[in-house]
Amino acid sequence: MLQVLREKAREVLGSEVEDLAAADSLAVVELVMDVEDAFGVELSEAEVGAAGTLADLADLVLAKTP
């Protein structure tokens, strides 16, 4: 899961960023939308805001994946 998120982050952000706070906020929104579509989950703004790293985002997606 984390590797898939890293690949998506590389595509969307143009680099391999582990710290979401260091990334451009619009790019993070695009990344989250791609992740939601790819894994069939919905992530709230609060959940995404609490996910500081790609690993945190991966854990969130795994917790919401049916």
Image (cartoon, rainbow, N blue to C red):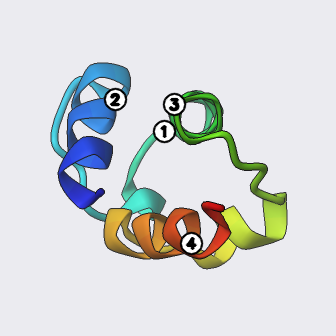
- For label 4, the SS is helix
Disc 2 marks which residue?
Answer: 13
Disc 3 marks which residue?
Answer: 27
Q: Residue 49, percent across and down?
A: 68, 68
Observer-side mark, 3 or 4, equals: 4
- For label 1, the SS is loop
Q: Earlier in the sequence, mark 1 or mark 2?
A: 2
Horizontally, residue 1 falls left or right of residue 49, namely: left
Tell me what residue is drawn at x 55 percent, y 62 percent: 61
Q: Earlier in the sequence, mark 2 or mark 4?
A: 2
How far apart are the two marked residues, 2 and 4, measured between alpha carbons?
20 Å
Q: Earlier in the sequence, mark 3 or mark 4?
A: 3
Most foreground residue, 63 or 8: 63
Q: Residue 19, percent across and down?
A: 33, 64
**Residue flagged by tag 4: what amino acid is it?**
Leu
Observer-side mark, 2 or 4, equals: 4
- For label 2, the SS is helix
How far apart are the two marked residues, 1 and 2, measured between alpha carbons?
8 Å
Q: Earlier in the sequence, mark 3 or mark 2?
A: 2
How far apart are the two marked residues, 3 and 4, measured between alpha carbons?
18 Å
Q: Earlier in the sequence, mark 4 or mark 1?
A: 1
- For label 3, the SS is helix
Q: Are marks 2 and 4 in contact (CB under 8 Å)?
A: no
Disc 1 marks which residue?
Answer: 24
Q: Residues within 10 Å of mark 2 (few under 14, many from 20)?
A: some
